[in-house]
Amino acid sequence: MNPLQQKIYDRFVRYVAVDTTSDPTSHVTPTTPSQISFAHTLAQEMRTIGFTDVEVDEYGFVTGLIPANTDKKAPVIGLFAHMDTVCDYNGKDIRPCLHANYDGGIITINAEKKMFLSPETDHNLKLCVGDDIVTADGNSLLAADDKIGIATIMTLAEHLLAHPEIKHGPVKAAFTIDEETGTGIAYLDVEKFGADFAYTIDGATLGEIDCGNFNADTVTIDIIGKTCHPGSAKGFMANPVRIAADIVSSWPEDKLPETTEGEEGFVLFKDVEGALDHAVVKGIVREHDLGKFEQFKKMLEALVEEKRRKYPAAKIDITFKKQYRNMRDILKERPQAMELLEMALKENNVPYRLTQARGGTDGAQMTLRGLPTPNIFAGYENPHGPYEWLSLGWVEKAFHTLESILKNAVK
Ligand SMILES: [Zn+2]
């Protein structure tokens, strides 16, 4: 491990020792108080490193500034990582295990539980021969998602402040709450944050760049039936239970989450509730391309119209509610974030792929609120479970990519 990787790793070990699991069932912000106390710990460290304007706001967002060290023109660049970890698997008592100088073979996570990583199933391990790999011990998450992002940003800040010869514009860092529950970022005051554009350091594999995401709406189909005694129902009854089932099974099978991947969209029917008088079908519509997205919604409307004709005694309504939109178009309109990123990736010989996330990201939400924010790889794999691992070689690449962006942004 070189000294830079060591610094990042030491921070990482300190950060994962704190349990900051978020809670999707909570109705307060942040969803767990541990995020607030972790925020104050990070704020203290930021002040020690030399950040100015360090602040923890009422929701637990930590922000700080590394002032520009040049008079030349440069945009204000934001760097984001999230503090919470997912509740799907244990996030307490995390014990990182270092597998130094990976030899390309099988990595034992926990021999007793027969938990291993193999390059046969985890193909990206083949790219990491010679790297230091980190896993948990089989009893918890590793929480590299996203504490390695925090460790990278913090170490980059320390590096910049220790090397005034590296010229850069204003850099704003933010450590954020409740990313895994999807509920935190809406509370960030984007205007006050005051960056021209930003990056979340929360992607997985080396070179993975998320610069797009789904367009997303919810759909609700409301069915009011016509009920009577079943013995005399012929030609009279309209049964919402059966109509709901008919609607769900009439949607094309090749446009479902379980049959699509990559840039293919889908409709997920996620909830059906009903009885003889009334039924409600709830779902979500997801598609990267806005034109196809609108087409999906028209298809659903047409499907409902068809069922209205089939069941004239029933009353069927369909409504859509906007959730979020693809950030891709905004990133194209304001291209500086992506231009600097691609230049930095090339400069550091990082083979990269521009991908469309099959979900929403914090960056997408911020982009739609006026702060263009693509997502950069942080260097981990298999997040949200006990097989999570990271490569310190990849993490170092993320570090140098960010450093190049900040340097190249100075005109
Ligand atoms: Zn994450």
Image: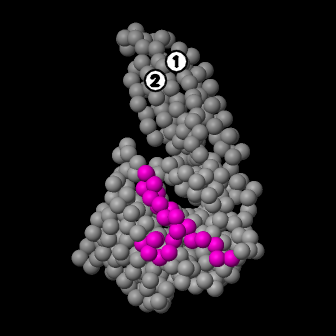
Residue designated by label 1: 314
Q: SS at mark 1?
A: loop
User: Which amino acid, mark 2?
Assistant: Pro
Q: Is residue 216 left or right of residue 123?
A: right
When asked about the image quadrant of residue 106, the answer is bottom left
Residue designated by label 2: 240
Q: Residue furthest left?
A: 112
Q: Residue furthest top?
A: 232
Residue at (35, 61) in percent of width and height: 37
**Residue 121 appears in the figure:** no
Q: Is residue 323 magenta?
A: no
Rendered image coloring scheme: one colour
Q: SS at mark 2?
A: helix
Q: Is residue 263 left or right of residue 52?
A: right
Q: Magenta segment range?
A: 45-70
Residues at circles 2 and 1 in contact by the CB criterion of under 8 Å = yes
Residue at (64, 40) in percent of width and height: 296
- Report how far apart the C-alphas of labels 2 and 1 lie in the structure: 8 Å
